[in-house]
Image (tube, grey):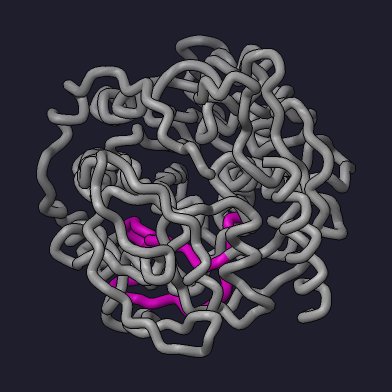
Amino acid sequence: MNRFHAALGLTILALFGCVQSNGANGIAPGAPPVLPAAHSLFGGKIKHVVIIIQENRTVDNLFNGLPGANTVRTGKNDLGQNVQLQQVSLTAPWDLSHRHIAWVADYRNGNMNGFNNENVHCYHHAKCPSHEVAAYGYVPQSEVQPYWDLAEQYTFANNTFQSNQGPSFPAHQYLVSGTSTIADGSQLRASENAHDPRDRGKQGGCDSIKGTTVATIDSKGQQSQFVYPCFSRVSIMELMNNNRVSWSYYQANKGAGQWHAVDAVRGIWNSPSYKNVKWPSSRVLRDIAAGRLDQVTFITPTGAESDHAAHNKGKGPAWVTSIVNAIGQSAYWKDTAIFVVWDDWGGWYDHVTPTVYNSYELGFRVPLIVIGPYAKAGYISTRQHEFGSILKFTEEVFNLGSLGTTDVRSDDLSDCFNFRRQPRPFKTIAAAPGARYFLNEPLDTQDIDDDF
């Protein structure tokens, strides 16, 4: 394993030096959706699955000190020295590299001590820390209290790992397909964010401007081939369409984007069911209030609410809580499972060594909160989970069959639930600002995922 990753690291370093409505689902408009039978494991008690995706944090960074969670306040650097983790505001003005090359450096052959080599990009003319210590930080609990409240009232999945070893664009592909392969049967995986030749940003998808490319990685860890970021690959959306399961995918704005996963899946982007992609993200709050929550819902944030380093406005906890409260205070609560997950590690330190299956899987730990009337109260799950676990849970709830990707090896998160008990009543989570603030926000068109 060590020799493989040493070779992998050298290969990538060399390369890096050279390359810098229901109607859309086939259901008649106005007709009630046909609800498939639920998997017997869950007893038909879950009829709605909601997946809220946030950005770029690790367990050690965002939930440091959460009771029962495995977190540390001291890390190691590549000299074998101890490095104290310092408090770093959620809105600190610097970002860390989360390219695959950064992952390899951080991982450092499984020693988890290369984070002192992280590249640091400072914004807003601020003074930023040295690369030697910038990644060794944790967010104060007081800035993310709503997240902690959710984690402590419901289930915190302590050993959830990002399925891929790279940034947001491929990570979001894994969240809808269980892989970032460029086509069914291909050995090439999209491994970085998409970029266009004029560096205009906001690319990634079948609607990217001409000349946009994304790096791919092969089974040997080589990133030498570049392709247009539009993939002929199955996604869970096709499985839902085939089984008449209604779905929505909420995103910040129209068109291509690193977080707009469905835009890069050709079979959906070029079909009537693309109507299920909706914007802005806050539209989900109106749809919940109007009784229009689909059976499966993906929700991605605006930059301001994303938790993405250097670009967020500290409102991610309130944004997520506004969605949870909206569902909790509605008729949907009694049969809904909500997953709140962060898409990649964002360069931040984490001390737990992932299981590495191949040249691009698994990545580092990311937080996952499991919420719902059947989610275990105050439970810390220590089983290994990954993005494929969320997909597998969804597949089993709606009898979708398997994608045949990382969902095959993944668990189904069933340890996070107790379906033998009566559904727990919802208790409102305190957070400010509330839903009205997000509903009145102007359209967010900024491109913040400018990994370097």
Asked if residue 283 shows in the view, the reply is yes
* Total marks placed: 0
Residue 366 in the magenta stretch? The answer is yes
Question: Is residue 6 rendered to the left or right of residue 65?
Answer: right
Relative vertical location of residue 137 with respect to residue 389 in this rendering, above or below: below
Place of residue 222 in the rendered image (x, y in percent of width and height, measured from the top left) = 82, 53
Q: Position of residue 288 (x, y in %)?
A: 29, 30
Q: Which residues are magenta?
A: 364-387
Q: Nearer the viewer, residue 420 or 138?
A: 138
* Left/right of residue 357 with respect to residue 247 in the rendered view: right
Residue toward you, 282 or 311: 311
Residue 337 visible? The answer is no
Classify residue 27 as left or right of residue 83: right
As drawn, 362 above or below 292: below
From the viewer's side, name the closer residue of 338 and 126.
126
Q: Please name the residue shown 77% across and 43% down the image.
A: 216
Question: Residue drawn at (48%, 37%), measured in percent from left and top?
Answer: 450
Q: Image check: 167 left or right of 9?
A: left
Above or below 315: residue 136: below
State the image quarter where residue 60 is shown.
bottom left
Q: Is residue 318 magenta?
A: no
What residue do we see at 83% from left, 39% from top? Answer: 225
Q: Residue at x 20, y 30 (%)?
A: 438
